[in-house]
Image: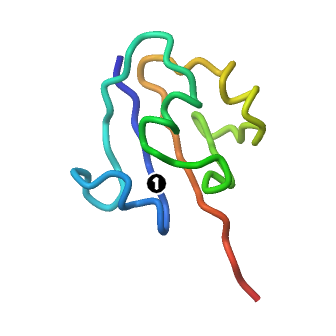
Amino acid sequence: MKVQVRLFAGLRDKLPDAERGRAELDLPDDCSLQELLDRLEIHEKQAQMVLVNGAQTERDRATRESLTLLEGDDVAIFPPLAGG
């Protein structure tokens, strides 16, 4: 199945073949959100905020393991942001 993935800020380099942190990835059916993060080598602390089809997901590993991605899903992953 194919999903759209967008990575922001320092996570963009996890998709070297994609322009500006965007890519369409071909994943196995029944792939979980956690499996996607593992495939991209994004540690759970690096994925501060994850949106699936515009809805924010919980940050705990159990939730990310239980969330199954579907064909055409749009996943956006943001690292921790600093500011002042």
Q: Position of residue 48 (x, y in %)?
A: 68, 55
How many marks can you see? 1
Q: Is residue 68 left or right of residue 59?
A: left
- Residue at image position (42%, 10%) is 29
- Reading the image, the residue beneath label 1 is 7
Q: Is residue 15 left or right of residue 36?
A: left
- For mark 1, give the secondary structure: strand
Image height of 26 relative to 58, above or below: above
Q: Quadrant of the C terminus?
A: bottom right
Residue 12, located in which quarter of the rendered image?
Answer: bottom left
Toward the left, the furthest residue is 17
Q: Position of residue 69 (x, y in %)?
A: 53, 21
Image height of 29 relative to 3, above or below: above
Toward the bottom, the furthest residue is 84
Q: Amino acid at mark 1?
A: Leu
Q: Position of residue 34 (x, y in %)?
A: 59, 31
Q: Nearer the viewer, residue 39 or 59?
A: 39
- Residue at image position (35%, 16%) is 1
Residue 68, located in which quarter of the rendered image?
Answer: top right
- Residue at image position (46%, 54%) is 7
Q: Nearer the viewer, residue 71 or 65?
A: 65
Q: Position of residue 11 (x, y in %)?
A: 46, 60
- Residue at image position (31%, 44%) is 23
Q: How is the image coloured?
A: rainbow
Residue 26, located in which quarter of the rendered image?
Answer: top left
Q: Nearer the viewer, residue 73 or 29?
A: 29
Image height of 12 relative to 37, above or below: below
Question: Around disc 1, counting alpha carbons within 10 Å, would you say few (fewer than 14), some (14 to 19), or many (20 or more)?
Answer: many
